[in-house]
Image (cartoon, rainbow, N blue to C red):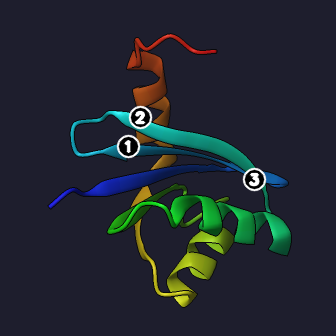
Amino acid sequence: MQQIIVGVDPHKLSATIEVIDQHEKVLGSGRFATDKAGYAAMLDYAARWSRTTWAVEGSNGAGRPLAQRLLTDGHRVVDVPAKLAARVRLLDTRPRA
């Protein structure tokens, strides 16, 4: 069964997501506002994939409000420490648009 990860980089006014499969193939991405409409749009966008796990950067810091909303709505959420996320970005060799 395919596992989908929704990686979230939360900020004060927006959340950037990247959706990947178990082979690290990027399936989608987007940037959403942190208000109710933006949160709903982000959930609608991610709903096209089943069995998602939300990997929220800094769930105990800047990402805490978003992680709590996702958990309250019944989503599977894991924390990605900010230090680890920074290292991944540093080592990422994929071209950026």
Residue at image location 55% in from the left, 87% down from the top: 73
Q: Which amino acid type is shown beneath numbered disc 2?
A: Val
Residue 20, label in figure: 1
Q: Which residue is mark 3?
A: 32
Task: Tell me residue 13's x, y (percent).
Answer: 85, 54
Label 3 sits on what residue type?
Phe
User: Mark 3 falls on what kind of element?
Assistant: strand
Q: Residue at x 41, y 34 (%)?
A: 26
Q: Residues within 10 Å of mark 3 (few under 14, many from 20)?
A: many
Q: Is residue 45 left or right of residue 5?
A: right
Numbered disc 1: secondary structure: strand
Amino acid identity at mark 1: Ile
The residue at 22%/37% (across/down) is 23
**2 or 1: tag closer to the N-terminus:** 1
Which is nearer the eye, 87 or 2?
A: 2
Q: Using a 10 Å C-alpha cutoff, classify the residue at mark 1 as few (fewer than 14 neighbours), some (14 to 19) or many (20 or more).
A: some
Residue 3 left/right relative to 59 = left
Q: Relative to residue 19, is residue 64 depicted above or below?
A: below
Examine the rendered structure and indicate whether residue 57 appears above or below residue 92. below
- Compare marks 1 and 3 and give the one earlier in the sequence: 1
Circles 1 and 3, Cβ within 8 Å, touching? The answer is no
The residue labelled by disc 2 is 26
The total of numbered circles placed on residues is: 3
Say which element carries label 2: strand
Q: Are marks 2 and 1 in contact (CB under 8 Å)?
A: yes
Instruction: Place residue 93 in its image quadrant.
Output: top left
Distance from Cα at disc 3 to Cα at disc 2: 18 Å
